[in-house]
Amino acid sequence: MLKRGFLIYLFFQSVFSNGQDPQFSQYYAAPLYLNPAFTGSSGCTRFTSNYRNQWFGLNKPYNTFAFSADHNLDKYNSGIGFQFLSDQIGSNGISTIDASILYSYRLDFSKKHSLRAGIQAGVVSKHLDVLQLSFPDQFSDDGFQNTASADYYNKKSRTYYADISGGLLYYSSRFWFGFSAHHINQPNQSFITNDGNAQLPAKFSIHSGYQIKLNHFEDERYDKRSTRSKSISPTLLLKKQGAFTQLDLGLYFLTKPFFIGLWYRGIPVQKTVSSFTNRDALVFQGGIRFVRLSMGYSFDYSISKLSNFSRGTHEISLGYVICGGYKKPKERLQTLPCPDFYNNELTK
């Protein structure tokens, strides 16, 4: 009974609150979702897919799938891309489909310093099975009455809206820093027919990191292609959306072709809106990267009060890069040092 009540609470929070975006723990394995400025950043043609099964102990209430494809247009210092996202809250909850196109422009300050600016425009469809909801006028002293509620008639089952986002990304051979702003237009996502207003809050994020080489070679080209190359990359991601703030802080270790990662999600010194300590999860990640193919798996171990119910979160990522048939990008095209990009020798 307690578990069922908690599920109902989560569902209604999702339906009638301002809402928050789906997230991926392997955020650098979903680059276009993190920041539109990543569009075309692989230097070739890239395909990525991500699947997240969040809180599987709660009868799988959150399932998110994303797919993206982007291509580098080196002749025009640009990148173009497409992204599709599907998010499902429970079997009878809110389902979201988001399709968007992306464009980025690269400004090279030197061979080792670049700035990318990106923009994203999309259309979002949200669906709600209104008949699965229960309202106060269906309850009496005799309990729940399975009769139609008057609230059914002022709610629609589907809503559509346009969504605009943008971002910036600076990077050198070892350091990167990005800023993104999603839902700049703060669209109305209300299911209420009579002038309902439920604006989706803009989401702002800062993401940064630094690659530290653990072994060095005199020949930089040999360094990038060596199977003995090792490095660590401390990273951070800070997000804010409405009253919600989240910090992901952690470390990647790479010894080609394998990688592992560990980081902490939460801000212990901050209280949530429910007066609970803002601590969410420990995230463990591992995977393998070849020249063109990358695969990753992560597990979120809940350390919040959800831990008794959620049992954690599974996430899988796949990435593939194609450069065959294209001319190699110019030598001045700096490869991103982010953990999910710097294993791509095809751009050199």
Image (spheres, rainbow, N blue to C red):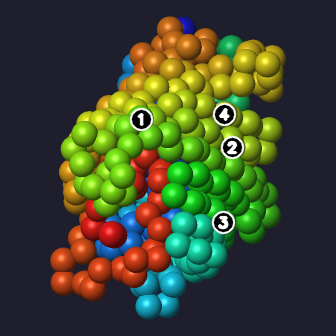
Q: Earlier in the sequence, mark 2 or mark 1?
A: 1
Query: Against 257, is 46 above or below?
Result: below
Q: Quadrant location of residue 311? A: top left
In whole angstroms, how far apart are the C-alphas of marks 2 and 1? 30 Å
Amino acid at circle 3: Leu
In whole angstroms, how far apart are the C-alphas of marks 1 and 3? 29 Å
Q: Earlier in the sequence, mark 3 or mark 4?
A: 3
Q: Which mark is on residue 214?
A: 1
Name the spot of residue 179 as percent of width and height, x first: 68, 57
For disc 4, the neighbor class at 10 Å (few under 14, some 14 to 19, many from 20) is: many
In whole angstroms, how far apart are the C-alphas of marks 4 and 2? 6 Å
The residue positioned 68% from the left and 34% from the top of the image is: 246
Query: Against 182, is 82 above or below?
Result: below
Provide the residue designation for mark 4.
247
Which quarter of the rendered picture does the C terminus lie within? bottom left
Provide the residue designation for mark 2.
239
Disc 4 vs disc 2: Cβ atoms closer than 8 Å? yes
Comparing labels 1 and 4, the label whose residue is closer to the camera: 1
The residue positioned 58% from the left and 51% from the top of the image is: 175
Query: Against 174, is 187 above or below?
Result: below
For disc 3, the neighbor class at 10 Å (few under 14, some 14 to 19, many from 20) is: many
Under tag 4, what secondary structure? Answer: strand
Q: Earlier in the sequence, mark 1 or mark 4?
A: 1
**Residue at the extreme bottom:** 75
In this rendering, position of residue 15 left or right of residue 270: left
In whole angstroms, how far apart are the C-alphas of marks 3 and 4? 19 Å
In this rendering, position of residue 221 left or right of residue 74: left
Comparing labels 2 and 1, the label whose residue is closer to the camera: 1
Provide the residue designation for mark 3.
168
Disc 1 vs disc 4: Cβ atoms closer than 8 Å? no
